[in-house]
Amino acid sequence: MNMTNVTIREERQGDEAAIRRVNEAAFGRPGEAGVVDALRAAGQATLSFVAEQAGEIVGHILFSPVEVRREDDAGWRAVALGPMAVLPGRQGEGIGSALVREGLARCRALGEAVVFVLGHPGFYTRYGFVPASRYGIDSEYGGGDAFMVAVLEEGALQGRQGAVFYAPAFRDVT
Ligand SMILES: CC(C)(COP(=O)(O)OP(=O)(O)OC[C@H]1O[C@@H](n2cnc3c(N)ncnc32)[C@H](O)[C@@H]1OP(=O)(O)O)[C@@H](O)C(=O)NCCC(=O)NCCS
């Protein structure tokens, strides 16, 4: 662990290039960095946090709006976590955990009742995420047990089934 002096703060103007580099390095391809840029350009980067140490951005997490739809109702809005990334040389130090914890705390403070994620089950279940299928909810991208939800407000998913649709920016990720 080398979390000394790692600060989690909201993204600000001027961070864009560094956030791009962190995502490209962590994923080993440009797709996710492109999603971040496209969401920001579309005004759909609902919450964006960076982990900073000694002036360097070493991690990033993003939340964007999703819609949960069922054939017989108008649908409702929630948020989804992702992409998130930590520089390869800095993984395993607790930076990702700090980003998820701070991100979820902010979502809760903003009144978000549930947060979805499509990602590594072994990682996100540490922070309260459970398979969304447990609630009868799936994703437009499938995902099985890798598609998860964190319920921040008890009972928020009662009677609310359906499929989660992401912002259009996610469609082009390769
Ligand atoms: C996933 C990621 C963001 C985690 O960040 P991190 O800073 O390494 O996370 P932490 O150090 O807080 O790790 C917390 C724990 O989760 C574990 N963990 C990390 N990645 C994991 C994975 N893919 N699956 C299961 N467990 C994982 C770590 O081993 C660590 O376990 P420990 O506490 O027992 O040592 C980072 O590894 C990353 O950027 N990966 C590449 C991009 C990616 O996959 N992003 C997420 C897409 S869903």
Image: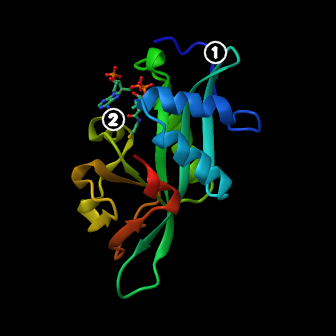
Residue 133 position in % (x across, y down)? 25, 61
Query: In the image, is residue 116 above or below residue 162?
Result: above
According to the image, what is the colour scheme of the structure? rainbow
Whether label 2 lies within 8 Å of ligand 1 gets the answer yes
Which element is circle 1 on?
loop
Q: Earlier in the sequence, mark 2 or mark 1?
A: 1
Q: Is 25 in front, or is 11? A: 25
Query: In the image, is residue 134 above or below residue 88?
Result: below
Residue 132 position in % (x across, y down)? 30, 58
In the picture of the structure, the residue carrying the numbered disc 1 is 5
Q: Is 112 in front, or is 32? A: 32
Around disc 2, counting alpha carbons within 10 Å, would you say few (fewer than 14), some (14 to 19), or many (20 or more)? few
- The amino acid on which the numbered mark 2 sits, given as a three-letter code, is Phe
Quadrant of residue 34 in the image? top right
Q: Count the marks.
A: 2
The answer to whether any part of residue 37 appears in the image is: yes
**Quadrant assignment for ligand 1:** top left
Q: Is residue 93 left or right of residue 71?
A: right
Q: Is residue 155 left or right of residue 145?
A: right
Which element is circle 2 on?
helix
Residue 81 position in % (x across, y down)? 47, 48
User: Which corner quadrant holds the N terminus?
Assistant: top left
Query: In the image, is residue 1 above or below residue 45?
Result: above
In the picture of the structure, the residue carrying the numbered disc 2 is 123
Q: Residue at x 42, y 61 (%)?
A: 154
**Residue located farthest toward the bottom when viewing the structure as drawn:** 72
Whether label 1 lies within 8 Å of ligand 1 gets the answer no
